[in-house]
Image: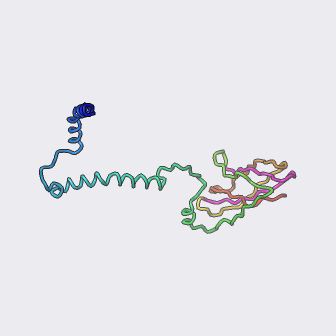
Amino acid sequence: MPARKSQIDGWWKRFDPIRARIDRLISGKAPSDPLYITNRSWQQKAKNAALAGAPVLLLIVVVAMGSTDLFRFRKVNPYEHTLREAAARPSSKRLPELVLRPADLEVVNIRIAKDSGSPSVTGIFRNNTNQKVDSAEVTYYLADTDGSLLATETASVANVQPHGSVAFHAPLKTANAEFVIVGDVHLN
């Protein structure tokens, strides 16, 4: 056993000069001043503080950027307004409170289409009953960008089959309307 141990020790001793050089590279030159820590200049103290504080500061910046969604990774609905924006806007007329409930007749996907030649209100009227609807009327509210009520308009649909749907298209009479809200759906 001792002969084997001496061979391994001899092999490791070959790497001692390399290990010493790496140790000197990492640790630096040994200081000759016994008070080398207290006798540092303010530049050396600032450099050490910056080296210690930079990773912490970087971590704080990354966490702040992630929590505030700085780069907008979420898709934003252009028709959606935050509660803060809605509360900040004073409006003279408030929109009526709408109660959502399952209905036999409903309007789906209503919007203001300004991409065509003349602006219009488009949507889909859906019949959820087992009976044919000969004629119905959709009443909707138009609001501006501040959420103020501008006008109330109607659109008519005809011949909607049971459990069927029909697309409707009505010209937009109020030019500065940005939002449309379904008010009422009733049979004629």
The answer to which image quadrant residue 143 occupies is bottom right
> Which residue is found at the position 78% from the left and 48% from the top?
166
The one nearer the camera, 114 or 97, is 97
Where residue 154 appears, as percent x and y from the top left, is 75, 57
Q: What main secondary structure does the magenta stretch of the protein show?
A: strand
Q: Is residue 93 left or right of residue 162?
A: left
On whether residue 142 falls in the magenta region, the answer is yes
> Which residue is found at the position 67% from the left and 57% from the top?
180
Q: Quadrant of the N terminus?
A: top left
- Count of all numbered marks drawn on residues in the image: 0
Q: Which residues are magenta?
A: 119-144
Q: Is residue 81 left or right of residue 14?
A: right
Q: Is residue 96 left or right of residue 66?
A: right
Where residue 52 appears, as percent x and y from the top left, is 30, 53
The one nearer the camera, 42 or 182, is 42
Q: Quadrant of the C terminus?
A: bottom right
Where residue 13 appears, as percent x and y from the top left, is 22, 34
On whether residue 29 falls in the magenta region, the answer is no
The one nearer the camera, 145 or 165, is 165
